[in-house]
């Protein structure tokens, strides 16, 4: 998915907050996103993943429950 620059920029404060969580190599850091149908959860998750990788060097994975 190609994300617009404004979407990525809007996600920076959240990514910066998540990046402040200390890294424990033996445990993953989980971030949950909730919201109504078509509220932008998947877009936000994709943007967060991108910003965490690019700005903070964090390895991320999105686990979607859209199929349930």
Image (cartoon, rainbow, N blue to C red):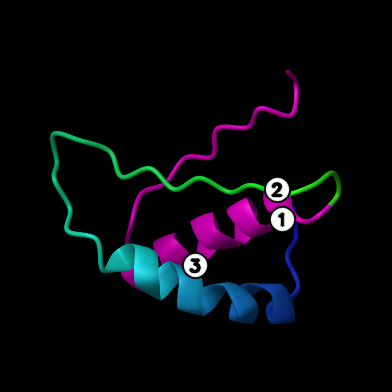
- In the picture, measured across the screen, residue 16 lies left or right of residue 6, that is left
On the image, the x and y values in percent for residue 36 come to 79, 47
Task: Give the mark, 1 or 3, whose residue is nearer the N terminus.
Answer: 1
Is 47 included in the stretch rendered in magenta?
A: yes
Distance between the Cα atoms at labels 2 and 3?
14 Å
Disc 3 residue crowd, few under 14, some 14–19, many 20+, Cα 10 Å: many
Rendered residue at 33%/57% (across/down): 58
Tag 2 residue: 42
Q: Is residue 45 above or below residue 37?
A: below
Labels 1 and 2 touching (C-beta < 8 A): yes
Rendered residue at 60%/52% (across/down): 45
Of badges 2 and 3, nearer the viewer stands: 2
Helix, strand or loop at mark 1: helix
Label annotation for residue 2: none
Disc 2 residue crowd, few under 14, some 14–19, many 20+, Cα 10 Å: some
Q: Residue furthest top?
A: 68
Helix, strand or loop at mark 3: helix
Q: What stretch of residues is rendered in magenta?
A: 39-68
Distance between the Cα atoms at labels 1 and 3?
12 Å
Tag 3 residue: 51
- In the picture, measured across the screen, residue 42 lies left or right of residue 33, that is right
Residue 39 vs residue 12, the one in the foreground: 39
Rendered residue at 28%/38% (across/down): 28
Disc 1 residue crowd, few under 14, some 14–19, many 20+, Cα 10 Å: some
Task: Give the mark, 2 or 3, whose residue is nearer the N terminus.
Answer: 2
Question: Residue 2 falls in which quadrant of the image?
Answer: bottom right
Distance between the Cα atoms at labels 1 and 2?
4 Å
On the image, the x and y values in percent for residue 26 come to 13, 34
Q: Is residue 25 above or below residue 20?
A: above
Label annotation for residue 43: 1
On the image, the x and y values in percent for residue 12 come to 51, 77
């Amino acid at each position: 998915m190609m994300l617009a620059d404004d979407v990525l920029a809007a996600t920076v404060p959240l990514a910066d907050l998540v990046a402040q969580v200390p890294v424990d190599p033996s445990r993953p850091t989980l971030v949950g996103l909730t919201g109504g149908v078509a509220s932008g959860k998947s877009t936000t998750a994709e943007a967060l993943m991108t910003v965490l990788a690019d700005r903070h060097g964090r390895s991320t994975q999105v686990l979607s429950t859209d199929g349930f």
